[in-house]
Amino acid sequence: RPLIVVGISGSLRSLSANSRILASVEGMLPAGAAFRTYEGVASLPAFNPDLDPDDAEPPEAVAEWRQTLRSADAVVICTPEYARGVPGSLKNALDWVVSSGEFMAMPTAVISVSPHPEGGATALGSLVQTLKMMSATIPDNAILAVPFASRKLGADGSVTDAGTLTSLRGLAGALLQAVT
Ligand code: FNR
């Protein structure tokens, strides 16, 4: 079967710079790889262990989220920083898969995109800590902060900045190398 890479945006905004940069990664994958964007972040209930008992099925949206991850060979997360943290909706999605373990040994690339000069590095560092706690495999070259977001995208939302394109290609390559 083809390699399946699941993309997750931490921004729910329709014109999100993060979602656009995430989409650009699709074109950097080898022919035959399938890129699927997980669109269910906003449909997940607020994490509550009481909704996830050992002896019963979790809510439907949670089951779908876990199944999406189980079908993936690799994951790319691209997120904004909100108030120096990971957006609550993305953290909520991650909290649903701490106990169920879908990120264990999952090759995962992480990107933060921000108009600020730091590029969302604080949220990015926090996201890396969360994923490492869940035993995800995050290659060193698959962690990227993209600052000054508005200068990196063209009017049609495509990535126009050469340095960013080079970094994204490096990230995609490092991620695929981690898929065994
Ligand atoms: C922000 N933004 C922001 N940026 C940053 O670098 N550090 C931060 O702590 C914050 N905090 C923050 C809070 C809230 C409530 C908003 C709405 C925004 C700016 C943020 O990076 C910017 O809006 C990005 O463009 C959001 O990404 P998308 O939606 O374009 O992908």
Image: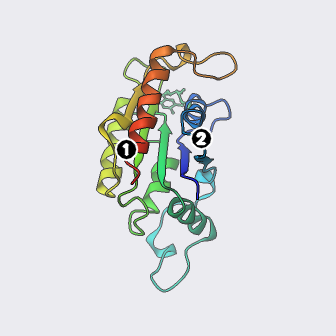
Instruction: Name the image quarter holding residue 25.
Output: top right
Numbered-mark total: 2
Which percent across, then down, holds residue 116? Answer: 43, 19
Label 1 element class: helix
**Which of pointers 2 and 1 indicates the residue nearer the eye?**
2
The vertical placement of 60 against 103, above or below, is: below
Q: Residue at x 38, y 37 (%)?
A: 142
Q: Residue at x 63, y 35 (%)?
A: 13
Residue at the extreme bottom of the image, as rendered: 55
Which percent across, then down, holds residue 165? Answer: 50, 22
The vertical placement of 98 against 33, above or below, is: below
The vertical placement of 91 against 58, above or below, is: above
The CA span between labels 2 and 1 is 29 Å
Is residue 81 among the parts visible in the rendering? no
Label 2 or label 1, whichever comes before in sequence order: 2
Label 2 element class: loop
Which percent across, then down, holds residue 97? Answer: 44, 63
Which percent across, then down, holds residue 93? Answer: 50, 55
The C terminus appears in which quarter of the rendering?
bottom left
Does residue 141 appear to the left or right of 52 in the view shown? Answer: left
Residue bearing the label numbered 2: 31
Does residue 22 appear to the left or right of 129 in the view shown? Answer: right
Label annotation for residue 127: 1
Task: Give the amino acid type for the residue marked by disc 1 in the picture.
Answer: Leu
Q: Residue at x 41, y 24 (%)?
A: 119
Residue contact at pointers 2 and 1, CB within 8 angstroms: no
Is residue 110 among the parts visible in the rendering? yes
In the depicted view, which residue is nearer to us: 95 or 65? 65
The N terminus appears in which quarter of the rendering?
bottom right
For disc 1, does the CB lie below 8 Å from ligand 1?
no
Task: Give the amino acid type for the residue marked by disc 2 in the picture.
Answer: Ala
For disc 2, does the CB lie below 8 Å from ligand 1?
no
